[in-house]
Image: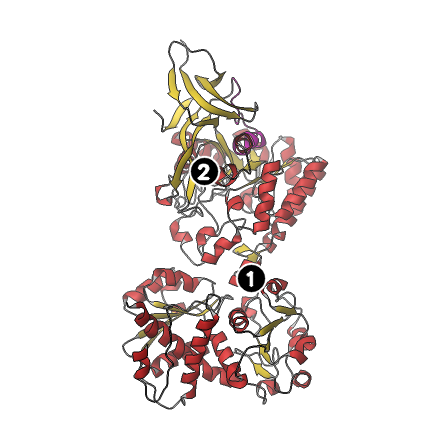
């Protein structure tokens, strides 16, 4: 690890300890591990996008194995690999042999046989990355498994909050909207609570389970009630594509109850941060004036996404391997 | 000419139908039980079964044999072979084949294939609705004549309560029970039990209400029509409450449960392993506690295998795509010994009642007893053998078993069907 950091001149990377080859979720990470990723990511984030970075991933090949459509996460991972000098291959799963009946495991093994160091996987079924991790030699990075986890998204959300507030300890963060179908929500719940934030889940009863309360999380059905207490509002996208039947009467009614608009913003703390994992449904979870307004850090999140993914790839592909050697 | 005699000497004979649990010789003459401790005859085969438990052959109320149509999962021959290996001498074959068992010809095909295989006895369960489509009655009268013992659409529960009511009325004419897999399909759109675990994993989930609502409906219709209802798969505390109240009112209702739902919980799904994707889903710890209590007090009458083999090609997939199902015939008895008898939930007499005597009564077949004159279907168990479940060694054609890799107690040491040795691991 010391070697890895001493190579760098433009970039000061901290001396870190990291043992995981895979990043499957935040549930299994300790507070210490989460702090490590955020610390490394914040160093990457300080380097301007146009400035050169050391080629930490030189000689490494990463495959983007996306079984679900995605533009931003796929692009963000690709950019992270390239900025650190690695090779990235985009595997368009929908157009491949999956339509010919090949299983996800066969596909992954085939790709691995071509020689890759890491598989970044997105899949519609929870546990798909875990299935790969059990069966592949390569590192597996979960880029979203159904409604289960999306660890790099939560990490970039946390990094964004840290940059504005310095600490998560004691902050009140509301995750608003479709909690039931949101992998971003689940990863945020684990990460935020582990670092000492108070989490409120807010949305219609059909999309927010009271069972979360047993895990130390607050549940509310009323955005107006909780609004004045929140330091951060993370407005989750309504996942129309995952819902088996519509869990609320109409988009109009949803927006009436849960959309973040200018009137609601006036009820919030003056320094409230407005976040959204995107892509956003303008006018549903968030109105355009709020999304583009001064409280919004939505684009900052996108920028931080690249830094977080560089940190995760470096830790899992470089540091974990060094640590693994005797 | 005197008939051939077999003396199973000095085993622990457990026969709930007579309330017997004692060391004795069980004597068999021809294809019938002669009795306990009958005087020695000049010519008899004496088999020392000391240290073993001798019980009436086990009877399974729910096993899918998959033939015709899904021979990649199981065939009638491999299924009855697996049944014997698991100590079952009789099984009720679920009709969810392709085509489904809804004609006399299909019933007779099943009987012929089973006879050719020569393993356990197979008792046909036929479709209650034509093609198990849930739209109109199957030709139940003709199916009874062909040998159908019960009627059920198996794992495609009848949605229409109007049709279900007619099924009860019509089956009642022939004194045949209606077997119901209690599940409301509209509530069962998921891969696992709905609870804290499914919430954390983000997996699509099946609430307990999917079962409780179905049990409530079926019990109400059975009561209203005077029909006879058997619930093939119970898994929730809520369903047990409904069942308990119905039995107290005198409704003709019985129920069975699989060993999986008595031994495992939804926590197993944290592995994301499709072996644990079974139907009904593995439930919460509270449900399992309630089920254990209900099996002990008799609210749940029987333990069935719930054998629903699915081949590896289908099972080794992500949890959304993998089908429900598990191989069970060869582990049911050992699971009962390991998870119910040894921890003290059931004594041997009650366990054998649940695995043999009660299911025989529910199915209406001459089995589940060692009374003199009854058919000589006998299972001999060595309760002290501990073994590791290795699905690759199963007789069943499929391998996906939630108990794989576990150490279970109790091995089948011998099986007699109709007085003939079908399996013998004895001196």
Counting from the top left corner in percent of width and height, residue B92 is at 51, 35
Q: Nearer the viewer, residue A187 or B376?
A: A187
Residue found 37% across the figure and 41% down from its top:
B394
- Discs 1 and 2 share one subunit: yes
User: Do we see residue B218 in this rendering?
Assistant: no
Identify the residue position indicated by label 1 in the image: B199
Counting from the top left corner in percent of width and height, residue B205 is at 56, 57
**How many neighbours does mark 1 have within 10 angstroms: few (below 14), some (14-19), or many (20 or more)?**
many
> In which chain is the residue bearing label 1?
B
Identify the residue position indicated by label 2 in the image: B334
The residues colored magenta run B354-372
In the image, is residue B368 part of the stretch drawn in magenta?
yes
Disc ID at residue A298: none
Residue found 41% across the figure and 84% down from its top:
A43
- Which of discs 1 and 2 lies nearer the camera? The answer is 2
* Between discs 1 and 2, the one toward the N terminus: 1
Q: Secondary structure at mark 1?
A: helix
Q: Quadrant of the C terminus of chain A?
A: bottom left
Q: Quadrant of the N terminus of chain A?
A: bottom left
Determine the image quadrant of residue A189.
Answer: bottom right
Left or right of A241, for residue A270: right
Counting from the top left corner in percent of width and height, residue B115 is at 42, 29
Residue found 65% across the figure and 31% down from its top:
B173
Query: In the image, is residue A166 above or below residue B112?
Result: below
């Amino acid at each position: 690890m010391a070697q890895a950091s001493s190579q760098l001149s433009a970039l000061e990377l901290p001396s870190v300890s990291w043992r995981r080859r895979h990043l499957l979720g935040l549930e299994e990470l300790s507070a210490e591990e989460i702090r490590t990723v955020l610390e490394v990511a914040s160093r990457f984030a300080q380097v301007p996008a146009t400035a050169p970075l050391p080629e930490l991933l030189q000689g490494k090949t990463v495959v983007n194995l996306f079984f679900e459509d995605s533009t931003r996460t796929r692009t963000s991972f690709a950019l992270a690999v390239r900025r650190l000098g690695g090779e990235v291959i985009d595997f368009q799963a929908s157009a491949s042999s999956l339509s010919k009946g090949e299983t996800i495991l066969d596909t992954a093994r085939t790709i691995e046989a071509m020689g890759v160091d890491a598989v970044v996987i997105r899949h519609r079924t929870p546990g798909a990355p875990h299935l790969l991790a059990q069966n592949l030699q390569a590192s597996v990075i979960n880029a979203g498994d159904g409604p289960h986890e999306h660890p790099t998204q939560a990490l970039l959300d946390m990094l964004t909050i840290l940059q504005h507030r310095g600490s998560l300890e004691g902050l009140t963060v509301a995750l608003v909207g479709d909690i039931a179908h949101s992998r971003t929500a689940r990863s945020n719940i684990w990460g935020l609570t582990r670092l000492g934030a108070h989490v409120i889940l807010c949305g219609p009863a059909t999309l927010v389970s009271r069972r979360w309360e047993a895990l130390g999380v607050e549940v509310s059905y009323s955005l107006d009630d909780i609004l004045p207490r929140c330091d951060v509002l993370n407005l989750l996208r309504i996942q129309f594509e995952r819902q088996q039947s519509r869990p609320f009467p109409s988009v109009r009614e949803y927006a009436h109850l849960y959309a973040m608009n200018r009137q609601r913003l006036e009820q919030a703390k003056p320094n409230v941060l407005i976040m959204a994992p995107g892509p956003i449904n303008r006018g549903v979870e968030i109105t355009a004036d709020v999304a583009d307004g001064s409280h919004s850090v939505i684009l900052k999140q996108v920028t931080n996404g690249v830094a977080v993914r560089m940190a995760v790839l470096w830790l899992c592909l470089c540091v974990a391997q060094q640590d693994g050697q005797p | 000419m005197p008939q051939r005699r077999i003396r199973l000497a000095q085993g622990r004979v457990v026969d709930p139908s007579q309330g017997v649990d004692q060391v004795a010789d069980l004597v068999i003459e021809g294809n019938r039980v002669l009795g306990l401790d009958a005087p020695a005859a000049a010519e008899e085969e004496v088999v020392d079964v000391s240290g073993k438990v001798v019980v009436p052959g086990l009877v399974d109320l729910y096993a899918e044999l998959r033939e015709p149509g899904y021979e990649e999962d199981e065939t009638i021959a491999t299924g009855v072979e697996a049944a014997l290996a698991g100590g079952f001498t009789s099984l009720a074959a679920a009709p969810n084949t392709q085509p489904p068992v809804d004609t006399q010809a299909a019933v007779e095909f099943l009987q012929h294939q089973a006879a050719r295989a020569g393993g356990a006895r197979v008792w046909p369960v036929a479709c209650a609705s034509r093609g198990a489509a849930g739209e109109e009655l199957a030709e139940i009268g003709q199916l009874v004549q062909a040998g159908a013992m019960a009627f059920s659409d198996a794992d495609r529960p009848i949605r229409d309560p109007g049709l279900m009511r007619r099924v009860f009325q019509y089956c009642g004419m022939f004194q045949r029970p209606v077997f119901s897999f209690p599940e409301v399909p509209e509530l069962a759109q998921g891969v696992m039990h709905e609870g804290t675990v499914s919430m954390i994993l983000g997996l699509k989930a099946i609430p307990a209400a999917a079962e409780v609502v179905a049990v409530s409906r079926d019990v109400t219709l059975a009561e209203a029509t005077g029909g006879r209802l058997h619930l093939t798969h119970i898994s929730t505390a809520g369903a047990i409450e409904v069942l308990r109240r119905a039995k107290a009112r005198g409704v003709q209702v019985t129920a069975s449960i699989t060993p999986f739902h008595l031994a495992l919980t939804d926590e197993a799904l944290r592995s994301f392993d499709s072996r644990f994707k079974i139907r009904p889903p593995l439930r919460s710890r509270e449900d399992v506690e309630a089920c254990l209590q209900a099996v002990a007090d008799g609210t749940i009458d029987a333990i069935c295998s719930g054998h629903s083999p699915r081949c590896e090609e289908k099972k080794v997939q992500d949890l959304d795509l993998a089908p429900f199902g598990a191989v069970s015939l060869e582990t049911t008895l050992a699971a009962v010994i390991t998870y119910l008898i040894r921890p003290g939930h059931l004594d041997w007499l009650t366990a054998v009642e649940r695995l043999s005597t009660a299911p025989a009564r529910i199915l209406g077949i001459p089995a589940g007893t060692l009374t003199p004159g009854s058919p000589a279907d006998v299972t001999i168990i060595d309760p002290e053998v501990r073994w590791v479940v290795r699905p690759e060694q199963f007789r069943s054609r499929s391998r996906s078993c939630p108990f794989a890799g576990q150490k279970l107690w109790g091995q089948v040491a011998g099986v007699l069907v109709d007085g003939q040795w079908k399996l013998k691991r004895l001196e």
